[in-house]
Amino acid sequence: MFDIPEFETYHEEYVRYVAPPSGRLLVKRNGSSITRKIPKPVVIIDTREQYPFDFGRFQNWIASEKRLKLNVGDYSIDGMEDLLTIERKNLSDLITTVMKQRTRFFKMCEKMSNYRWKALFVEASYEDIKSPYGYYTSAHPNAVSGTLDALEAKFGIPVIYTSQYRELAEEKAASWLSKHFTYWHLESNGFGRVLQEGDL
């Protein structure tokens, strides 16, 4: 189903990661590919995003991106603005938000809960969240991780831990957005919410 390329270096000084797929997500009906009949999504980036993800490397998944003011969250898809939203937080922003802007953050999460598809993308691994934060904050890792679990339980917002490596976080967001768009497009056009016959 996926084109798996050779290993490619993202951060040579640290570790090697598998490059993202170079092909489209394969969709079949009656044994034949209908992938080319499915458009690629246009990602909407909220105008308030100061350091937005760059989706330009993922032309197999994403058609383009544009900046618009979103009611909730940092990212959505053109045509799905009332259905899908992503809120993005890097580690330092997450810690500050959870510890010092908790009330506002919870209100935002309450608004996100009304969306059919939503997620909080954290630019950090769970290991990063659970590690001591150092001198710049008195926040405890258990308080931050516990708050994220509470938000997920209360509002039904999946918390997706990505990576502090920006390229991996961008890849995860691009993949997530394109998959949700593909299933929505298939469902909206009478193809059902399956990639291939026989999928559950």
Image (cartoon, rainbow, N blue to C red):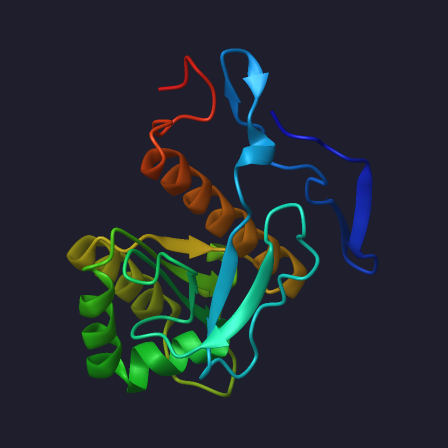
Apparent side of residue 85 relative to residue 15 in the rendered image (left or right): left
- Residue 86 place in picture, x, y as percent: 39, 62
Image position of 12 with respect to 175: above or below = below
Q: Residue at x 40, y 34 (%)?
A: 186
Q: Is residue 4 above or below residue 81?
A: above
Residue 176's spot in the image, x, y percent? 48, 48
Q: Is residue 165 visible?
A: no
Q: Residue at x 21, y 73 (%)?
A: 106
Which one is nearer the viewer's eye here, 182 or 140? 182
- Where residue 130 sits, quadrant-wise, is bottom left
- Front residue of this view, candidates 124 and 49: 49
Left or right: residue 177 versus residue 63 is left
Above or below — where is 48 with respect to 1? below
Up the image or down, 188 lies above or below 163; here it is above
Q: Position of residue 62 (x, y in %)?
A: 59, 53
Say which quadrant the N terminus sits in: top right
For residue 101, say whether it is visible: yes
Quarter that holds the C terminus:
top left
Quadrant of the rendered structure where residue 22 is?
top right
* Nearer-the-camera pick, 25 or 132: 25
How many marks overall?
0
In the displayed structure image, the side of residue 169 where residue 82 appears, left or right: left
From the top left corner, tell me how far across and down residue 42 is, in percent: 52, 59
In depth, the one of 45 and 145 nearer the eye is: 45
